[in-house]
Amino acid sequence: MEIGLGTYLALASVLFGIGAVGFLTRRNILLQLMSIEVMLNSVNLTLVAFNRWTPGEPGAWNHHGQVFAFFVIAVAAAEAAVGLAILISLYRLKSSVESDSADLLKH
């Protein structure tokens, strides 16, 4: 039994939905960052799945989906570094990592 493109897209949409619900319902900034990472991984799964099932020219270099996935991974790493830096500064100022206490960071 071969797993088709629809199975990968269904899994990616479920992962994206879990990440979106996690981001919108959690108040802990660390859990919100983890939910964003889950959403980015679902995008990576979609890119790689489409690349796998898109026919290319014979003998041509057909790895565009993987290249885009590597760029998404690099952006996710930068997002995690910046997000954790903001989280550490918030914790030092407010002694809390709840997103409700982040409204006073502008002072």
Image: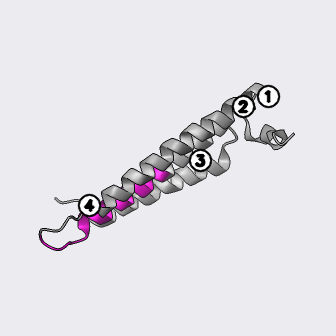
- The Cα atoms of the two marked residues, 3 and 1, are separated by 25 Å
Mark closer to the chain start, 3 or 4: 3
- The Cα atoms of the two marked residues, 3 and 4, are separated by 32 Å
Segment tinted magenta in the rendering? 40-58
Residue at the (87%, 39%) spot, across then down = 107
Q: Is residue 57 magenta?
A: yes
Q: Amino acid at mark 3?
A: Gly
Badge 2 crowding class, 10 Å Cα cut-off, few under 14, some 14 to 19, many 20 or more, is some
Residue at mark 4: 63
Residue 58 as seen in the image, left or right of residue 91: left
When the figure is inspected, residue 41 is found, relative to residue 65, above or below; the finding is above
- The Cα atoms of the two marked residues, 1 and 4, are separated by 46 Å
Instruction: Point out the residue furthest to the left here.
Output: 59
Image coords of residue 94 (percent x, y): 80, 29
Q: Nearer the viewer, residue 43 or 83?
A: 83
Residue at mark 1: 93
Residue at the (78%, 40%) spot, across then down = 102
Residue at mark 3: 22
Q: Quadrant of residue 26?
A: top right
Badge 1 crowding class, 10 Å Cα cut-off, few under 14, some 14 to 19, many 20 or more, is few
Residue at the (75%, 29%) spot, across then down = 96
Please tell me whether mark 3 or mark 1 is closer to you in this view: 1
Q: Are marks 3 and 1 in contact (CB under 8 Å)?
A: no
Task: Tell me, yes or no, if residue 9 can be seen here.
Answer: yes
Mark closer to the chain start, 2 or 4: 4
Residue 105 as seen in the image, left or right of residue 77: right
Image mark for residue 89: 2
